[in-house]
Image (cartoon, grey):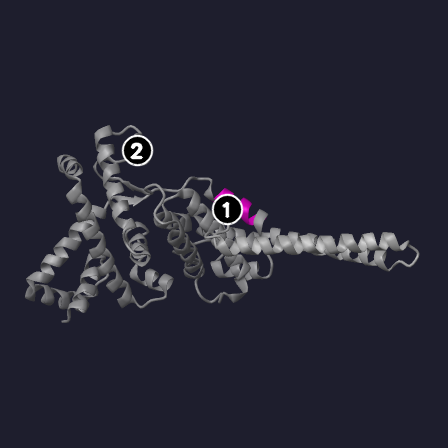
C-alpha cells in the first residue's frame, strides 16, 4: 500500500500542509493508480472510479489539517475513498461494466489481442461470473474480497485500512468468501453452457 | 477449538498468514472435524476459481487527468468566493451611495431602491429554489 520514493509520504504531507500544492500532487500521483484500481473494483465503471478518486483527493486536500502525519497516508485516504464509493453504490444501485479480467486459460486483457477467440470468450465469461456474484455481496464483503483477492493486501494492511482488528479481517473474509461461493454456485446452476465450456477448456 | 476460531484460521491458512502455533492448532481441528475439512475444501475451490482473475488496469491517462483536476478544482472555491464577495460588496456600496445621495432627485433614489429590493428578492427566490433542488437531489454528495 505504501510506495517507496525519494521523498516519503510524511515529508510530502508536511510540505502539502504548509501550502505546497506540488507536494500534494506528487503524493496524489503516487497513490492514484492503486486508488483507481480499488474504486474500479467497487464501481465497475472507470469513469465513476476516476470521479471518486479525484473527489477523494480533493477532500483529503481540504481536510489535510485533520490528518495525523505520524500515521500512514493511504489508509486514511482510503477511508475517504471507500465512503464516497459506497455512497455512490447505495444511490445508483448496480451498474458498470465488468472490471475483471481472467488471465488463465488464454484469457487476455483486453480480450481479442492475438488469443484463441474461444479461450478468450471462456476467460471473459469466467471474469463476468465472478463480477456478477461479487455485486450481490454487501459493500463490506465486496470490499474485503477486492482488497484481499484483487489488490493482494496482507491482513495487516487490510486491518489498518478498515480500522478493524486482524481477527475481524479473518472472520469477515470467511463470511465474504462463503457468500461469494454461494453466489457463484447459484449462477453456475443457471449457466450449464458456461460450465461445459469451462470444463472443456480446463 | 470453537468454530469461529477455526474459520479464522482456515482463512489465514488459505492466505499464507498462519504462524507455527496456529498451523498446529488448525491441523488438529481439521483432523477432528470432517465438516471443517469439507468447508475448507469448498473455500479452497473458490480460491482456485478466483486465481488468475484480476482487476484490469485503468487507462494510462488517469494520473495526468488527476493532476489537471487537482490544479483546476483546488483553486476554484477560493476563486469563486473572492469574485462573489467582491461583487456583492461593490454592488451594496454603489447602491447605498446612490440611495443616500441627497443631490439626486427622489424618483431616481426610489428607482435605485426598487432595483436593490428586486435584486434581493430575485436572489432569495433563486437561493430557495436551489436549496429545494439540493435537498431533493439523490446525488448531492457526489461531486462530478
Residue at 17% over, 40% down:
A191
Point 33% across, 51% down: residue: A151
Q: Residue at x 29, y 61 (%)?
A: A155
Residue A24 shows in this picture: no
Residue B64: in magenta span: yes
The residue closer to the viewer here, B138 or A190, is B138
Q: Do tags 2 and 1 sit on the same chain?
A: no
Residue A117 against residue A44 in the figure, above or below:
above
Horizontal side of A52 relative to A113 (left or right) equals right
Q: Residue furthest right?
A: B103
Looking at the image, residue A61 sits to the left or right of residue A160; the answer is right
Q: What label sits on residue A111 in the rendered view? A: 2
Residue A5 drawn at (x, y percent) = 46, 53
Please give the chain letter of the residue carrying mark 2. A
Q: Which mark is residue B66?
A: 1
Question: Hey, which quadrant is residue B128 in on the image?
Answer: bottom right
Q: Judge whether A201 appears above or below B133 on screen.
A: above
Counting from the top left corner in percent of width and height, residue A40 is at 37, 47
Quadrant for the N terminus of chain B, please: bottom left
Disc 2 to disc 1, C-alpha distance: 27 Å
Q: Are marks 2 and 1 in contact (CB under 8 Å)?
A: no
Residue A104 magenta-drawn? no
Give coordinates of residue A175: x percent, y percent: 23, 60
Give B94 or B99, whichever is nearer the viewer.
Answer: B99
Q: Residue furthest bottom?
A: B1
The spot of residue B25 in percent (x, y) is: 14, 68
Please provide the residue range marked out in magenta. B63-71
Q: Which label is found at residue B100? A: none
Q: Is residue B65 above or below residue B120?
A: above
Provide the secondary structure element on which disc 1 rests.
helix
Amino acid at each position: 500500500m505504501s510506495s517507496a520514493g525519494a521523498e516519503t509520504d510524511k515529508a510530502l504531507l508536511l510540505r502539502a500542509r504548509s501550502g505546497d500544492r506540488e507536494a500534494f500532487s506528487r503524493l496524489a500521483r503516487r497513490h492514484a493508480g492503486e486508488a483507481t484500481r480499488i474504486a474500479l473494483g467497487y464501481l465497475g465503471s472507470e469513469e465513476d472510479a476516476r470521479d471518486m478518486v479525484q473527489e477523494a483527493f480533493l477532500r483529503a486536500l481540504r481536510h489535510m489539517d485533520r490528518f495525523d502525519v505520524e500515521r500512514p497516508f493511504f489508509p486514511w485516504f482510503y477511508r475517504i475513498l471507500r465512503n464516497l464509493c459506497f455512497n455512490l453504490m447505495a444511490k445508483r444501485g448496480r451498474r458498470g461494466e465488468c472490471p475483471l479480467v481472467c488471465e488463465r486459460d488464454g484469457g487476455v486483457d483486453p480480450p481479442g489481442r492475438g488469443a484463441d477467440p474461444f479461450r478468450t470468450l471462456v476467460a471473459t465469461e469466467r471474469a463476468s461470473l465472478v463480477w456478477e456474484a461479487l455485486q450481490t455481496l454487501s459493500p463490506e464483503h465486496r470490499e474485503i474480497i477486492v482488497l484481499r483477492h484483487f489488490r493482494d493486501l496482507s491482513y495487516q494492511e487490510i486491518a489498518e485500512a478498515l480500522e478493524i482488528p486482524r481477527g475481524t479481517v479473518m472472520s469477515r473474509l470467511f463470511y465474504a468468501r462463503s457468500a461469494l461461493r454461494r453466489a457463484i454456485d447459484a449462477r453456475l446452476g443457471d449457466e450449464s453452457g458456461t460450465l461445459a465450456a469451462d470444463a472443456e477448456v480446463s | 477449538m470453537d468454530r469461529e476460531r477455526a474459520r479464522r484460521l482456515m482463512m489465514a491458512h488459505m492466505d499464507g498468514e498462519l504462524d507455527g502455533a496456529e498451523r498446529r492448532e488448525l491441523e488438529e481441528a481439521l483432523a477432528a472435524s470432517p465438516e471443517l475439512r469439507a468447508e475448507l475444501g469448498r473455500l479452497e475451490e473458490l480460491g482456485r476459481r478466483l486465481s488468475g482473475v484480476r482487476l484490469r488496469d485503468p487507462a494510462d491517462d488517469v494520473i495526468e487527468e488527476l493532476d489537471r483536476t487537482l490544479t483546476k478544482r483546488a483553486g476554484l472555491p477560493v476563486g469563486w468566493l473572492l469574485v462573489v464577495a467582491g461583487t456583492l460588496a461593490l454592488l451594496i456600496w454603489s447602491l447605498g451611495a446612490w440611495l443616500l445621495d441627497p443631490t439626486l432627485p427622489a424618483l431616481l433614489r426610489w428607482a435605485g431602491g426598487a432595483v436593490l429590493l428586486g435584486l434581493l428578492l430575485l436572489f432569495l427566490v433563486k437561493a430557495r429554489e436551489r436549496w429545494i433542488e439540493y435537498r431533493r437531489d439523490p446525488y448531492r454528495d457526489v461531486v462530478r
